[in-house]
Image: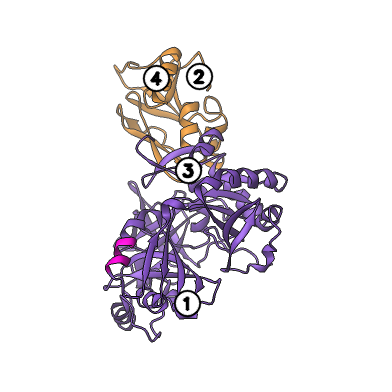
Amino acid sequence: MENLKKTPLYQVHVDAGGKMVDFGGWALPVQYSGILDEVDAVRNRVGLFDVSHMGEIYVEGKNALDWLNGMMTNNVTKLVDNQVMYTFMCYPNGGVVDDLLIYRYGPEKFLLIVNASNTEKDWQWLVNHKDSGVELHNTSEETAQLALQGPLAQKVLQKLTDYNLADIGFFRFADPVTISGVKVLVSRTGYTGEDGFEIYCNPEDATRLWQEIMTVGKEAGIAPCGLGSRDTLRFEANLPLYGHEISQEITPLEAKLGFFVKLKKKADFIGKEALKNLKEKGLSRSLVGLTMVDRGIPRAEYPIFDADGKEVGVITTGSYSPTVDANIANALVDTKYLEEGTPLWVGVRKRRLEARVTKLPFYKREAK
Amino acid sequence: MNIPEELKYTKEHEWVKVDGNKVTVGVTDFAQEQLGDIVFVELPEVDEEYDREDSFAVLESVKAAADVFAPFAGTVVETNEDLEDDPALVNSDPYGDGWLVSFELADGEELTDLMTPEDYQKFVEEQE
């Protein structure tokens, strides 16, 4: 753990019994009480995550909007103030630089939230494409982030603020919000498929906020959560993970995330032509959900075979799913095999185990 | 951490219990703690033969699959079928209902390289 980067909450995790691991160069808890417990807490009550490793980059200046719109696949001009948008940055060939959130403060000020392991790469990519009238600031080191997720998230957080949190709609944010005396940015966003908030604060306030939330959350059955459950939760809810469902080699169209790629928007953006061509030509592979029929757990990178034993794809994420109580996977397969119910076989060590193509998402929370 | 007196241990964090010709193997409390919630156990078939250091079972947590290696050469005589429906027994009772497999030692095979409970305790402390 000595050579790893530490979030401001490192000591809190160690003291509270978090199982610390090397997570892409960061010392972070993979779990507290256990992944099954933590998934249950977030699906049914509320859980608190330290996601301070995420990257934050401000984009400001009078050309900020137009420039961002040319960098991103989604239509950034549709964002209104205090709204959050999910988008991709792509390479010219349509592969993904990163997936990220854009927070709009105004037409001349935006905040990008990027993947921890991609922060340096994204920063270089943005700097290399920077235009006049655009200023960039990487504030990743000066920002801590907590994620409070689950159906009771609002009830718990409301105990610490006079701000009416019900006013923050889905994919909206407020800044500043005063939470237990600390000024923070709060958005109704997350990576679990549940209602909840992401809270951005100064590193020196992180420990106090964490402890205050844990204290007022006790009654609601709050659980401190690690990155293991976060990955299971996002996977069950069909949220992609960079390096798995999308990557430099896997385009958003193949990952069935075309909704966030606006090929009809007026502005040219990096990757537009390649993605347009790919769409016109038709995909040769696409993401599907798989549910195991035979007993066994599918894992990332396991090969997929058809009934004739021909290799026709690969698993991008696979796991036992506690919420669905089944062994499930996402897989990139030849587009001949997308129909629901199609039998496919997963190479698990020396055996080939039968699975069926299943409708996605595996899990969707019930509307209120 | 629980390290029962009557068992022998391996560097792979398995326990071994000798009962006449039958040698039963499971994983230690330390191992189950490290692995986290076990959600699937892949067991061998009865009569399958294994050499030393062969993987004879796989324990899968939510996040990962871990091989369990044979501490000696032998033939499977019994497997813990309860784990099929309740793999979490490995977590809740690693030395009892969470046992994995019983073997009959191969001809001429002897139990060597096993640790006493005291030695295993020291071994684990060095790992932490």
Q: Nearer the viewer, mark 3 or mark 4?
A: 3
- The span picked out in magenta is A122-128
At label 2, the amino acid type is: Ile
Image quadrant containing the N terminus of chain A? top left
In the foreground, A203 or A278 = A203
Where does residue A286 sit, x and y in percent of width and height? 37, 70
Q: Nearer the viewer, mark 1 or mark 4?
A: 1
Q: Which residue is mark 3?
A: A30
Image quadrant containing the C terminus of chain A? bottom right
- First-in-chain label (4 vs 2): 2
Q: CA distance from mark 4 to mark 2?
A: 12 Å
Where does residue B15 sit, x and y in percent of width and height? 44, 22
Question: Is any part of residue B90 visible from this angle?
Answer: yes
Q: CA distance from mark 3 to mark 2?
A: 25 Å
Q: Is residue A126 magenta?
A: yes
Q: CA distance from mark 3 to mark 1?
A: 38 Å
Q: As drawn, is A109 to the left or to the right of B53?
A: right
Is label 3 on the same chain as label 2? no
* Dot label at residue B123: 4
State the hue of chain B. orange
Q: Which residue is mark 1?
A: A107
Helix, strand or loop at label 3? It is strand
**Residue that appears at 51% across and 35% down:** A14
Q: Residues within 10 Å of mark 2 (few under 14, many from 20)?
A: some
